[in-house]
Amino acid sequence: MKAGNSYFSSSNPIKGVYGDFIVTPKDKKEVLFYRLSILSCGLFFSLGLVQWFTNGSSQIWIYFAGLGISLGLGLKWIHIYLRPLHQALIFFWAVGCIGLGIVSYHFGLTNLIYGLKENPKWVFLVGPLFVSLTGIGFKEFFCFRRIEAIGITIFIPIVFIGHLTELTDEKFTFALLVLSALFLLILGIRKFDLPAEADIGDKSVFDFLESQRKLNTPDIETS
């Protein structure tokens, strides 16, 4: 029984840049939730495209919503050293979710994809959602040099730029979306091959940056 729960046991002391640290069971649970969120993003993305290809786009909004929720949860549990970058990704996610709601209300849930396809400029409203997804892909490549992360970081921007400028046709756009979804799914699956400590990073750096942030934040005097 103990061996089965070893994943969630505290690690041995790990030497960091600014001192030793321990990866706690809470840290490991957050990593598991993050990985499940990324895997869910890949599943919703892929299944949505399968639905689109086989039965049309009328029910795509379900997978869009699932992707947005999974992405938001992933951003909640992701570990990024730079707090402003983390906040920026959350900001783009929130703006994209609001934009998705506006587009869904304007065109109707069952006409979501048709509306975006026929009116490229409306993509600006949902684009920030995929900016945050691209940011996660960039983070994964920067930290782990995963080839599939490059696919997400490069192909998704090409899809949106090509559609906005109308330089790419529907088949090319769909093909790149399929590749992006597959790369994201592969990334989500391969995340589980890594030890939890890899996704946590150097906690001593987090602690150092947090202490510096507190030092640079003036105290609010109360009377």
Image (cartoon, rainbow, N blue to C red):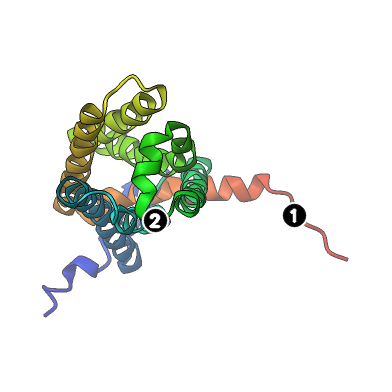
Give percent across and percent down for residue 111.
Answer: 37, 50
Q: Secondary structure at mark 1?
A: loop
Nearer to me, 170 or 99: 170
Give percent across and percent down for residue 156.
Answer: 31, 33
> Mark 1: few, some, or many residues within 10 Å (few <14, many ≥20)?
few
Nearer to me, 215 or 45: 45
Query: What amino acid is found at the position of numbered circle 2 in the picture?
Result: Leu
The image quarter containing residue 80 is top left
**Split into 4 quadrants, where in the image is the C terminus?**
bottom right
Give percent across and percent down for residue 90.
Answer: 48, 49
The residue that label 1 is drawn on is 219
Q: Is residue 146 visible?
A: no
Separation of residues labelled 2 and 1 (CA atoms): 48 Å
* Relative height, residue 209 to residue 69 (above, below): above
Q: Is residue 35 visible?
A: yes
Q: How many marks?
A: 2
Residue in the image at 36% along x and 28% along y: 163
* Relative height, residue 157 to residue 76 (above, below): above
The residue that label 2 is drawn on is 109
Give percent across and percent down for residue 208.
Answer: 50, 47
> Mark 2: few, some, or many residues within 10 Å (few <14, many ≥20)?
some
Residue in the image at 11% along x and 73% along y: 3
Query: What amino acid is found at the position of numbered circle 1 in the picture?
Result: Asp
Q: Nearer the viewer, mark 2 or mark 1?
A: 2
Does label 2 or label 1 sit earlier along the sequence? 2
Left or right of residue 49, residue 24 in this image: right
Mark carried by residue 124: none
The image quarter containing residue 81 is top left
